């Protein structure tokens, strides 16, 4: 087994755009689920709208990269708003059902051939990097050390990703430390009690849904920055992966989603390199290399179940701050 | 969770002040004067009040075939303590829900302090100065006790999305609110628990917290749904005192209670409901002699103390020497005294 290669790939994923994208999505979900108690099962839909909003704005409308990003964020915000109007007055479970279905509708709309000239249907979209890379202030060449050597364009993606993540973390942290965050946490605990205290619960839930949606949309944009957009990515299992990352770190924390995404991706990369190598080395004689590649997804599912059962508050969460069993 | 460990807590300046300001409470309960002359004419269901804070007309609420509330006319007197009594299922909680905007009636209208409340959402009702608590306590478990309290304050600048991002805009107000919260917590003897999660409180303490939290909004009318249910008998007296204090501070209180002893002790006016209707009204002494009341309410439980029925005195060891039988006997003696 090529241990050096396996470990280097895993270490590299620490600052991969995918990790940052997950961290953003998980942070958005923390606002929804961890702080406001909104069971959003359509994270993939928010990310898809961010990503497609960005790519389509550039390819179809010729927007500059920053305006395209704004379009992606606005699209996610609009999605949140539209989903919120009918569901936020209903019991919590309805939001889960509606979001999971709406996210699928979004994905299928991007997949169908009806809008092929705009969405690229099954092929997805690519080649929208010109404007973004032109804005790259770094001179050409490769930089970095050890496993973290990247071209200037790759660094540019990571820098923008880190900036987005930092902004989102500061925003969520400030909000949750404020009276606004207090109301939100109160709603998570018992919305009728908060209503009885004179707070417009619907409005707060809507604000939280839009805020978290925009942050998840930013995650979708960062996911799309380095290469391409394809509807096959924004499936429901993406939502569950983001949940895994969130629960790993702690749902009602600001840094939990970050650390959770990091652990998630380092482990994913490690397993996706390690398991096939183990098959090759004859350690897992009962499966093929391809089977070994999918084994990691089974392990993710098992990990998610174990987490919810044994450590629902995540690694960083306070045991009492978030539990599923009341 | 040990926020009340002495070395761990760091009370802010405002919290210390609040603790110092608190004078020791006199231990002997004093009988306070009842408000009288609240109604106009003969006390009967729907009787007009001299100064009503709530006037409800034709309020009806049905659940399928069941008419839970069917109140022709009722007025709640301002500045007094009104008890709403009636057997389980009489529609008391449903009436609370309707009056506070948590439920919508099939028909009817009601006016609070001069403005119509029909169709007004619950949060606006609360902002107008009419707050309620719930029969099933709603402590916000994973917020600390003091956070629970601060949530009750009205008109907070930091509760607006954009303002919340600039602490300079709301910090001063927030400190003020915290000071007020600590004062109230001290009064309710919950100050030692201020930094604990509300989930760690006992059932009775949660009732106290919910009431204190409602007071944070400085309401005109406080509606308490079974405030004494599940409260340790040792705490009941202080809870009754708190309710009497509310009246002294100029608030109006409407509360649901099953225990006649307590109703007699603190209520200025009693409204009796049965099967959704108001069947009797009057001052506590008169009402309890009313045959309609004995029929509808006392009849079923005459031999059992209602505190026992509602599970309040079930826990013998918490009673600090007071047993259900004792309280019951006391209640009967009092009843007999007044009948002479
Ligand atoms: N949401 C509901 N759905 C159906 N029936 C209800 C509902 N709420 C209350 N009821 C019924 O209405 C009646 C009055 O209930 P409630 O107001 O809770 O009584 P109380 O508080 O006086 O004990 C009861 O018969 C109860 O079963
Ligand atoms: Mg009730």
Image: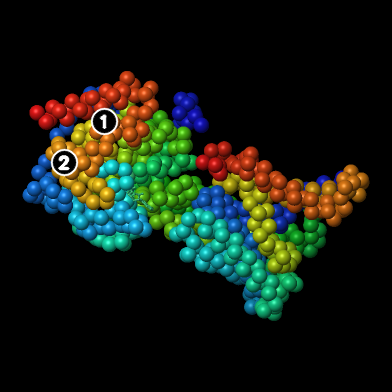
Q: Which residue is mark 1?
A: B303
Q: Position of residue A13 (x, y in %)?
A: 75, 52
The reply to whether callout 2 and callout 1 are in contact (CB within 8 Å) is: no
Q: Nearer the viewer, residue B173 or A292?
A: A292
Q: Nearer the viewer, residue A83 or A255?
A: A83
Of callouts 2 and 1, the N-terminal one? 2
Q: Position of residue B9 (x, y in %)?
A: 46, 30
Mark identifier at residue B123: none
Kindly indicate the quadrant of the structure image that contains residue B198. Answer: top left
Tag 1: Cα neighbours inside 10 Å, few (<14), some, or many (≥20)? few
Q: Residue furthest right?
A: A281
Residue at image location 64% in from the left, 78% down from the top: A61
Q: Residue at position x 19%, y 52% from top?
A: B74
Classify mark 1: helix, strand or loop: loop
Residue drawn at 70 percent across, 77 percent down: A113
Q: Residues within 10 Å of mark 2 (few under 14, many from 20)?
A: few
User: Horizontally, is A128 left or right of B194 in the view?
Assistant: right
Task: Locate residue A101 relative to residue A140 in the image: left or right.
Answer: left
Asked whether mark 1 lies closer than 8 Å to ligand 1, one says no
Q: Which residue is mark 2?
A: B291
Q: Quadrant of residue A236?
A: bottom right
* Quadrant where the C terminus of chain B is found in the figure: top left
């Amino acid at each position: 087994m090529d241990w050096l290669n396996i470990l280097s790939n895993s270490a590299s994923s620490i600052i991969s755009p995918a990790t940052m994208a997950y961290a953003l999505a998980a942070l958005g979900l923390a606002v929804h689920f961890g702080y406001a108690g909104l069971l959003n099962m359509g994270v993939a839909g928010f990310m898809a709208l961010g990503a497609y909003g960005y790519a389509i704005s550039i390819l179809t409308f010729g927007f500059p990269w920053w305006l395209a990003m704004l379009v992606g964020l606005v699209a996610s915000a609009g999605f949140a708003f539209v989903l919120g109007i009918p569901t936020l007055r209903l019991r919590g479970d309805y939001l889960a059902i509606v979001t999971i279905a709406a996210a699928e509708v979004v994905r299928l709309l991007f997949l169908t051939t009806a809008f092929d000239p705009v969405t690229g249907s099954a092929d997805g979209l690519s080649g929208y990097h010109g404007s973004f890379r032109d804005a790259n202030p770094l001179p050409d060449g490769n930089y970095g050390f050890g496993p973290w050597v990247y071209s200037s364009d790759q660094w540019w993606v990571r820098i923008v990703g880190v900036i987005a993540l930092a902004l989102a973390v500061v925003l969520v942290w400030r909000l949750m430390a404020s009276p606004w965050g207090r109301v939100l946490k109160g709603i998570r605990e018992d919305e009728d009690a908060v209503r009885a205290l004179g707070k417009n619960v619907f409005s707060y839930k809507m604000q939280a849904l839009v805020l978290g949606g925009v942050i998840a949309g930013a995650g979708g944009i960062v996911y799309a920055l380095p290469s391409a957009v394809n509807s096959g990515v924004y499936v429901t299992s993406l939502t569950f992966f983001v949940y895994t990352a969130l629960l790993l770190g702690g749902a009602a924390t600001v840094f939990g989603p970050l650390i959770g995404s990091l652990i998630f991706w380092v482990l994913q990369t490690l397993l996706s390199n390690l398991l096939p190598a183990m098959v090759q080395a004859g350690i897992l004689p009962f499966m093929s290399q391809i089977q070994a590649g999918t084994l990691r997804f089974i392990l993710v599912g098992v990990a998610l179940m174990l987490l919810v059962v044994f450590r629902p508050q995540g690694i960083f969460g306070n045991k009492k701050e978030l539990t599923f069993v009341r | 969770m040990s926020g009340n460990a002495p070395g761990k807590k760091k009370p802010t300046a405002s919290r210390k002040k609040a603790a110092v300001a608190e004078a020791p409470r006199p231990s002997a309960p004093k009988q306070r004067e009842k408000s009288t002359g609240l109604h106009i004419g003969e006390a009967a269901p729907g009787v007009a009040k001299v100064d009503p804070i709530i006037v409800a007309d034709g309020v009806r609420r049905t659940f399928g075939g069941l008419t839970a509330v069917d109140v022709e006319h009722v007025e709640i007197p301002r500045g007094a303590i009104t008890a709403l009594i009636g057997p389980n299922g009489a529609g008391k909680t449903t009436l609370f829900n309707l009056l506070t905007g948590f439920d919508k009636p099939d028909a009817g209208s009601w006016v609070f302090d001069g403005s119509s409340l029909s169709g007004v959402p619950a949060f606006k009702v609360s902002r107008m100065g009419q707050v309620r608590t719930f029969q099933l306590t709603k402590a916000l478990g994973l917020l600390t006790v003091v956070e629970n309290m601060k949530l009750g304050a009205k008109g907070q600048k930091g509760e607006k999305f954009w303002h919340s991002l600039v602490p300079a805009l709301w910090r001063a107000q927030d400190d003020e609110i915290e000071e007020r919260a600590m004062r109230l917590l001290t009064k309710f003897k919950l100050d030692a628990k201020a930094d604990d999660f509300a989930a760690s409180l006992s059932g009775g303490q949660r009732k106290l917290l919910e009431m204190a939290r409602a007071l944070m909004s400085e309401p005109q009318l406080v509606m308490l749904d079974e405030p004494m249910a599940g409260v340790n008998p040792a705490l009941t007296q202080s809870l009754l005192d708190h309710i009497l204090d509310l009246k002294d501070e100029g608030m109006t209180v409407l509360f649901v209670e099953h225990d006649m002893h307590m109703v007699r002790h603190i209520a200025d006016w009693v409204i009796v409901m049965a099967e959704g209707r108001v069947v009797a009204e009057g001052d506590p002494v008169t009402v309890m002699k009313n045959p309609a009341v004995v029929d509808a309410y006392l009849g079923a439980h005459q031999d059992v103390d209602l505190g026992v029925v509602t599970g309040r005195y079930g826990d013998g060891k918490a009673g600090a020497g007071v047993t259900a039988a004792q309280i019951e006997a006391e209640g009967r003696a009092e009843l007999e005294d007044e009948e002479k």
